[in-house]
Amino acid sequence: MRNGKGKNRTEPVLPGSWDRTGCELYAGEDNQKPGRRYYAHNRNWNLVLPEEGKFRAVFEDVRYTFGPRDLVLLAPGPPREFIVLEPLKVHWIHFNLDAHLQYPPEWPTRGPGVFLLHPPASDRVEFIHLFSEISSLCRVRRAGWYRLGYCLIQEILLRGNMLNEQGLDQKSIDFAARILQDFSSTATMDELAERCSLSRAVFFRKFKKTFGMPPCEYREQQKLNAVRQELENGISSLKELAEMHGFDSPFYLSARFRKMFGVSPREYRRNYLDHLSREQ
C-alpha cells in the first residue's frame, strides 16, 4: 500500500518505510493508525494479509472491507485506495505474476480482480511466516533473493489454491450427502461424482473421509434409519417398506436391517411395542 499524496495515483509517492528492492517485487509490514489513506501499485499484483485491525479497499467506487481473517489477492487493474479503519498491522507484497510465476491463482473471487481466502488459524500462521520471510529478503537483498522471493510467492498462491480446492470439495461432498438423503433421487454414484467435479475414486475417498463410510453405504444407512422410523410409526409391511425405500425385495430389506440393527424388522417392531407398553 502506498501513500496517496501524489496526484497521479498510478505513480504514488512511497513512504520512507518502503524499500524498492527490485524492478517488480516489493514487500513489507506496516503498523498504521485509523484514518490513513494509501494507494496500491495497480500495475502489479498485490497480496495483502492484515494481522490486526481492519481496512477498506476502494476500486472504481466499489468498497470492500477486510480484516484479520482475510488473505487478499488483487489483480492489476484500476487504481485502488486503502483506508485504515482500525489500528492496523498488515503484511503486503507487490509482484509481477505473469513474468515470474508458473501457476496462476485459483482462489474464490469477491469481485472483479479481487480474490479472497479465509485461512484456518494454523495455515494463517504459515502465511504470516511466508510474508515476513519475503519482506526480509526484500530488505537484505542477498545473492539469489529475487528468485527465492518469487518461489515463496508461488508457495503462497499454491497454498491458497489448495485451501480453495479443499473448501470446494467439502461443499461438493455435503451437497452429495443431501442428495443421498433424498430417497426420491435416482442419481447413481458416477453421476454424483460428476456433479461434484470429482473422479469416482476421489469422490469415494473424500466422502469416506468426511462420513466414515462410502457413499453407497451412507445411502443405505439413511434408508434403513427411515425404515426404522416407519416401523416405530406403525408401518409393519415389509413389502410396503421395501417399495417405499428402494430395496429389491422384503427379504433383502430384512437381511440389511438385521446387519445394521442386530434384529429383523419384525423383531424390532415387536421390541419397540413392548418397550412402549412397559412405559405406560
Image (cartoon, grey):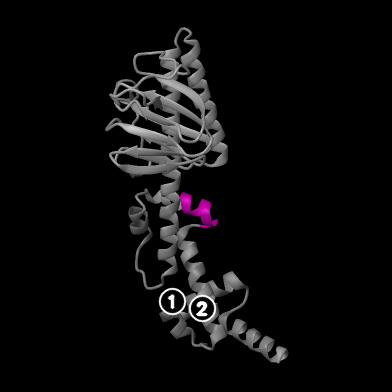
Q: Which residues are magenta?
A: 205-213
Residue 66, quarter of picture: top left
Residue 77 or residue 10, whichever sits in front = 10
Residue 94 image position (x, y, % from top left)? 38, 24
Q: Quadrant of the C terminus?
A: bottom right
Question: Looking at the image, which residue is at 49% across and 41% down?
Answer: 67
Q: Quadrant of the N terminus?
A: top left
Residue 7 makes an appearance in the image? yes
Q: Would you name the residue on which mark 2 appears?
A: 227
Residue 133 or residue 205, whichever sits in front = 133
| 206 in magenta | yes
Residue 79 image position (x, y, % from top left)? 30, 31
- 170 up-or-down from 80: above or below: below
Q: Would you name the residue on which mark 1 appears?
A: 245
Residue 161, quarter of picture: top left
Classify mark 1: helix, strand or loop.
helix
Classed neighbour count for the residue bearing mark 2: other residues with Cα under 10 Å, few (<14), some (14–19), many (≥20): many
Residue 99 or residue 235, whichever sits in front = 99
Q: CA distance from mark 1 to mark 2?
A: 8 Å
Residue 168 image position (x, y, % from top left)? 41, 48
Tell me which secondary structure the magenta stretch mostly adopts: helix
| 116 in magenta | no
* For residue 59, side relative to residue 254 (left or right): left
* For residue 177, side relative to residue 87 (left or right): left
Q: Amino acid at mark 1?
A: His
- 182 up-or-down from 130: above or below: below
* For residue 11, side relative to residue 3 (left or right): left
Cβ–Cβ under 8 Å for marks 1 and 2: yes
